[in-house]
């Protein structure tokens, strides 16, 4: 089996950590690079977290580059300390990272990897605000044709989380999201419609708690704190574990089913800035390059994570 080559652009973050572990522990994935963006926490904090998660997951040979510390036009990201804590991973223990961050900007690392690899072999997996991806597309427009696909966690066809109709990753940098969605690369939007089906239930947490590996012990801490914070801050009985859904889509597209639909990002509305306007009325233009994930196979999704935790 040919492994799927991916770059993860992230802001860890509890669920970003799960996504990185899933990629690291999946035999179907070849993780070429990790890049970071300010989102759940500041760029300094999320980059440090990425380095430490990578250490835990034996990813020492994967380059990690820090990227945007703020959105393209807007002043600053609204960090999600209510959900992810002051460090971005409060209440978890990780090895100290001694390995170095790549000297390149995240956007440059993305460009370099996509231009180096054969055409249409690299999938971008953005799971934070889209600032680095927009910058990469502007630094080297050729990447748009070269990338195989962009499978992102963000947005939603029917609902938002940070605002009634806007999801955090899009709402933090709507202009960057607009740039990314208007480029003609194939995009799969793995948004809240899908990730609200990926709830860390008590049964799931029990299964992970039974696994005796460093990654599984860390995952148990992650899911415990994520659950508490989602309960306190949003009233959810079980937390939606968003980001690994995008990685799962790359591993096996039958686990995360998507339908073709035009999607545009609203970036000017008083109430709707950050909304991903998804046209699900049915008649899809032949040149439509976007699709929206709507249906998760929960059992197979959690099995992917459990199997990855066993391997790490
Ligand atoms: C999750 C996130 C931000 C805020 C809240 N309340 C919950 C992060 C996750 O890491 C995920 O990538 C996305 N943003 C979900 O909106
Ligand atoms: Ca994230």
Image (cartoon, grey):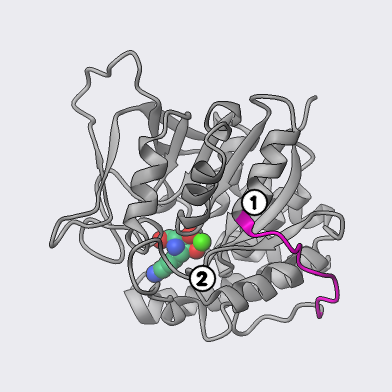
- Report which quarter residue 112 is drawn in: top right
Q: Name the one closer to the observer, 130 or 2.
A: 130
Element class at badge 2? loop
Q: Mainly helix, strand or loop, the magenta region?
A: loop
- Occupied quadrant, residue 99: bottom right
Q: Is residue 209 magenta?
A: no
Is 34 on the left or on the right of 46, as rendered? right
**Mark 2 packing: few (<14 Cα in 10 Å), some, or many (20+)?**
some
Report the Cα–Cα distance between label 1 and label 2: 15 Å
Specify the label residue 108 is tagged with.
Answer: 1
Could you classify mark 1 by the number of other residues whose Cα lies within 10 Å: few (under 14), some (14-19), or many (20 or more)? many
State which mark lies toward you, 1 or 2.
Answer: 1
- 156 vs 100, left or right, is left
Q: Helix or strand or loop: what does disc 1 sit on?
A: helix
Residue at the image point whose x is 76% and y is 62% from the top: 102
Question: Does label 1 or label 2 sit earlier along the sequence?
Answer: 2
Question: Of the numbered discs in the image, which one, if any, rests on residue 33?
Answer: none
Q: Position of residue 189 (x, y in %)?
A: 42, 41
Quadrant where the C terminus is found in the figure: bottom right
Name the residue carrying label 2.
Answer: 69
Q: Are marks 1 and 2 in contact (CB under 8 Å)?
A: no
Residue at the left extreme of this rendering: 270
The residues colored magenta run 96-106
Q: Quadrant of the N terminus?
A: top right
Q: How many numbered badges does the structure rendering display?
A: 2
């Amino acid at each position: 089996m040919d492994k799927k080559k991916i770059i993860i652009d992230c802001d860890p973050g509890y669920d970003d950590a799960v996504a990185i572990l899933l990629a690291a522990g999946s035999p179907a994935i070849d993780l070429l690079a990790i890049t970071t963006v300010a989102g759940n926490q500041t760029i300094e904090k999320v980059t440090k977290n990425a380095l430490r998660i990578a250490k835990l997951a034996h990813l020492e040979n994967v380059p990690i580059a820090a990227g945007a510390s703020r959105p393209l036009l807007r002043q600053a990201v609204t960090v999600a300390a209510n959900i992810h804590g002051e460090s971005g991973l409060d209440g978890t223990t990780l090895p100290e990272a001694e390995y170095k961050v790549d000297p390149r900007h995240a956007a440059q690392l993305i460009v370099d990897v996509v231009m180096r690899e054969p055409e249409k072999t690299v999938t971008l997996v953005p799971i934070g605000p889209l600032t680095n991806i927009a910058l990469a597309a502007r630094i080297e427009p050729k990447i748009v044709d070269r990338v195989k696909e962009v499978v992102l966690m963000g947005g939603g066809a029917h609902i938002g989380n940070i605002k009634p109709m806007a999801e955090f990753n899009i709402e933090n940098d709507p202009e960057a999201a607009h740039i990314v969605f208007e480029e003609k690369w194939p995009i799969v939007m793995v948004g809240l419609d899908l990730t609200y089906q990926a709830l860390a239930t008590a049964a799931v947490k029990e299964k992970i708690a039974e696994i005796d590996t460093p990654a599984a012990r860390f995952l148990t801490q992650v899911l415990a704190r994520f659950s508490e914070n989602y309960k306190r801050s949003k009233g959810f009985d079980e937390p939606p574990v968003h980001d690994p859904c995008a990685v799962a889509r790359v591993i096996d597209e039958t686990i995360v089913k998507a339908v073709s639909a035009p999607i545009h990002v609203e970036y000017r509305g008083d109430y709707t800035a950050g909304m991903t306007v998804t046209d699900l009325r049915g008649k899809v233009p032949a040149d439509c390059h976007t699709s929206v994930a709507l249906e998760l196979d929960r059992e197979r999704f959690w099995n992917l994570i459990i199997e990855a935790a066993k391997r790490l």
